[in-house]
Image (cartoon, helix red, strand yellow):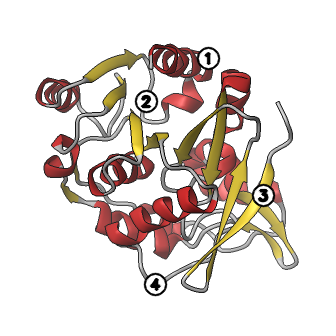
């Protein structure tokens, strides 16, 4: 796999950072969840090989992208469309985890014809969550070890988000932005999930505390062309079972 190239996409004067894993394969736009960033999908890009060109932005307020006062649905989905425009992509497969999953199927609903197929990782058509626990995380710590200890059980989900700064170790997002973003994400999105008829794969972690099996089954039963695959993981399927996740995604893409 080629070393990814980092691009800056300008959107209304705000910088959105984006990784392009390169190659001449078909485009796959990969959208991470809260606390994540584009490099979350490095292993998936490697597993998919030259057949697919993975483009993975750091979504607004995450990673190397700039903060904003707007974490609305319009904002996130508009960013995704702008990334496609930047790379000249008119027909993409869009994959998304959690926050990114809702962004993905809303992109397909709001920009018909621009999304060829969907891969949705462990998020439902109804979202109701609270990220206020992250407000207790430290802004800075003197060493990486001290920061990891302060993050407690959440640390294993935040490996990619830890950085060293001039004034110590911290995270590449502001917790209050994540809380605001989740509040904007919460709601009933059935109308968007059921709009459009492109092929869709829903990947459910059977131990997830975000997506229930009942909701996952209802989502594929109600949407034409959707299928469900379950893996024995929690909410972060791509991280807990990277090989199984990549295999499921690759099999789905091979059938397109």
Residue at 45% in and 42% down: 97
In this rendering, which labeled residue sits more in front, label 1 or label 2?
A: 1
Q: Which label sits on residue 69?
A: 4
| Separation (CA) of disc 4 from disc 3 | 24 Å
Residue denoted by label 1: 243
Q: Secondary structure at mark 3?
A: strand
Residue at 34% across, 22% down: 206
> Could you tell me how far apart the alpha carbons at marks 3 and 2 are, in whole angstroms?
30 Å
Earlier-in-chain disc, 1 versus 4? 4
* Residue 47 location (% of width, % of height): 69, 22
- Tell me whether the residue at label 3 lies in contact with that at label 2, contact meaning CB atoms closer than 8 angstroms: no
Give the number of the mark in front: 2 or 4: 4
Question: Who comes first in sequence, dot 4 or dot 3?
Answer: 3
Q: Which residue is mark 3?
A: 6
Q: CA distance from mark 1 to mark 2?
A: 15 Å
Q: Earlier in the sequence, mark 1 or mark 2?
A: 2
């Amino acid at each position: 796999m080629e070393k990814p190239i980092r691009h800056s996409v300008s959107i209304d004067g705000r910088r959105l950072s984006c990784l392009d894993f390169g190659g001449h394969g078909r485009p796959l736009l990969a959208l991470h969840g809260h606390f994540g960033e584009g490099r979350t999908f490095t292993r998936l890009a490697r597993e998919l090989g030259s057949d697919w060109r993975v483009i993975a932005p750091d979504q607004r307020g995450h990673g190397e992208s700039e903060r904003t006062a707007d974490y609305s649905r319009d904002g996130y989905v508009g960013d995704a469309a702008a990334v496609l425009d930047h790379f000249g992509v008119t027909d993409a497969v869009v994959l998304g985890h959690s926050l990114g999953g809702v962004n993905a199927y809303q992109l397909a609903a709001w920009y018909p014809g621009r999304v060829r197929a969907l891969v949705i990782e462990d998020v439902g058509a109804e979202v109701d969550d609270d990220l206020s626990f992250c407000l207790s995380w430290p802004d800075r710590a003197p060493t990486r070890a001290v920061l990891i200890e302060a993050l407690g059980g959440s640390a294993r989900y935040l490996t990619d988000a830890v950085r060293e700064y001039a004034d110590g170790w911290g995270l590449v997002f502001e917790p209050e932005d994540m809380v605001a973003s989740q509040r904007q994400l919460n709601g009933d999105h059935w109308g968007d999930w059921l709009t459009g008829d492109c092929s869709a794969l829903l990947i459910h972690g059977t131990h997830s505390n975000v997506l229930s099996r009942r909701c996952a089954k209802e989502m594929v039963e109600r949407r034409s062309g959707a299928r469900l695959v379950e893996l024995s993981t929690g909410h972060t399927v791509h991280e807990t079972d990277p090989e199984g996740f990549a295999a499921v995604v690759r099999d789905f893409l091979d059938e397109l």
